[in-house]
């Protein structure tokens, strides 16, 4: 079940982030609690989670950014896409991203950007596979155009994925 995170999800989200790039759960101090409450209470900050059997197994963050250009339309920024190692390859992250896309469309965003990458070379194949799956399994129908890979002069998809990060416009 895909939904937005609620106050009681903090521990589960922090556990899930161990599969992203964190090496330990941060100290549960006032700064962490204040940051969590800012995220949960900010109407433009959407921490999206996907549950399987009551356990949060995947997540992404979608931030709606107000903008004065493009007829004063906001844009959406997607970050921190992660799936628990034991649940990868089942479409959970794609469902989170679809939920984020729905939020972006509801908010009248003129674009949705996914910035992703890993500092750990051994994780890049997983990232590349996820992005390939998104690009070739339905995301191309958005606005009847294929998503543009933003770093695009004449870079190939593989070259972009081999770098530490890349950006894809999804709307």
Image (cartoon, rainbow, N blue to C red):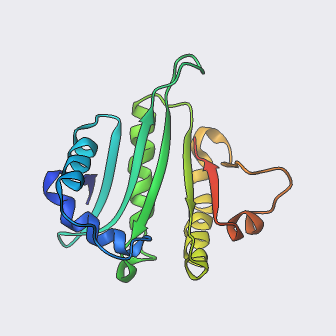
The picture quadrant where one finds residue 53 is: bottom left
Image spot of residue 86 (x, y percent): 36, 83
The picture quadrant where one finds residue 94 is: bottom left
Residue ID at (68%, 48%): 146
Q: Report the quarter where the N terminus lies.
A: bottom left
Image spot of residue 12 (x, y percent): 22, 67
Image spot of residue 26 (x, y percent): 27, 67
| Outermost residue toward the top in this view | 71
Residue ID at (33%, 45%): 46
| Outermost residue toward the left in this view | 8
Image spot of residue 31 (x, y percent): 23, 52
Residue 9 visible in the current orientation: yes
| Outermost residue toward the right in this view | 154
Residue 138 visible in the current orientation: no
- Say left or right for 115 vs 43: right
The picture quadrant where one finds residue 143 is: top right
């Amino acid at each position: 079940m895909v939904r937005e995170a609620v106050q009681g999800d903090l521990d589960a989200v922090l556990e899930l982030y161990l599969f992203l790039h964190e090496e330990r759960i941060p100290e549960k101090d006032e700064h962490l609690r204040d940051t969590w409450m800012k995220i949960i209470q900010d109407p433009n900050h959407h921490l999206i989670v996907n549950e399987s059997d009551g356990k949060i197994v995947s997540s992404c963050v979608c931030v709606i950014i107000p903008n004065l250009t493009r007829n004063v339309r906001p844009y959406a920024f997607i970050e921190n896409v992660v799936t628990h190692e034991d649940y990868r390859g089942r479409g959970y992250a794609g469902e989170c991203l679809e939920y984020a896309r729905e939020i972006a469309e509801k908010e009248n965003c003129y674009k949705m950007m996914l910035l992703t990458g890993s500092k750990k070379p051994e994780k890049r194949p997983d990232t590349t596979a996820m992005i390939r799956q998104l690009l070739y399994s339905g995301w191309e129908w958005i606005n009847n155009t294929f998503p543009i890979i933003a770093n695009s002069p004449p870079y190939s998809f593989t070259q972009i994925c081999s770098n530490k990060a890349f950006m894809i416009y999804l709307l």
